[in-house]
Image (cartoon, rainbow, N blue to C red):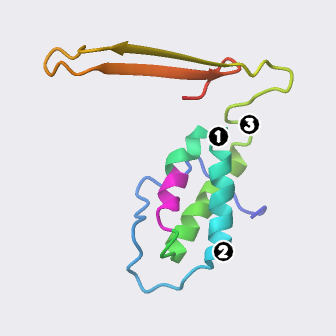
Amino acid sequence: MEDFSSFNTPICENHNLGPAHESVEDVDPTQYRAMIGSLMYLTASRPDIMFAVCLCVRYQANLKESHMKAVKHILRYLKGKPKLGLWYPAASDLKFVAYTDSDFGGCKSTRKSTTGGCQFLGGRIVS
């Protein structure tokens, strides 16, 4: 895929991905799953592709060519954005810090608890 141009988004706005009902040629599931596995690993440092990758993961059981095209679209997006993502320099302190806030009975109308939180790894927010 070196000769192909890159894309500006990880997936098309009108992607039309769904369960494959069309009578299109099947795709090699081994190659598809290997590509999806690599992309899932990459989502730890590239949250921008999380939605698109998780959308493609849903259709591993009944693959069609449209699903493979969506995965290749993600790869072409990554080609054009190689420096985008969360970077953890080797010299940085990778201390994990988490903050949370709970308010028991905090919702005025339902009296249910409300909570929120965030986690940082090496000074960078991860969740």
Characterize the magenta stretch by its predominant secondary structure. helix
Residue 32 location in percent, x, y? 63, 69
Residue 87 location in percent, x, y? 73, 30
* Element class at badge 2: helix
Q: Which amino acid does label 2 sit on?
A: Thr
Nearer to the camera, 83 or 106: 106
Q: Residue 8 carries which label?
A: none
In percent of the image, x 48 and y 67: which residue is there?
59
What's the distance in space between the residues labelled 2 and 1, CA to CA? 23 Å
Q: What residue type is labelled 1?
A: Ala
Residue that label 1 marks = 44
Q: Which amino acid does label 3 sit on?
A: Lys
In percent of the image, x 57 and y 68: which residue is there?
69
Side of 52 relative to 88 (left or right): left
Side of 48 relative to 84 (left or right): left
Residue that label 2 marks = 30
Point out the stretch of residues depicted in magenta.
Answer: 52-59
Residue 117 location in percent, x, y? 46, 20
Residue that label 3 marks = 83
Give the crowd class for mark 3: few <14, some 14-19, many >=20 residues within 10 Å.
few
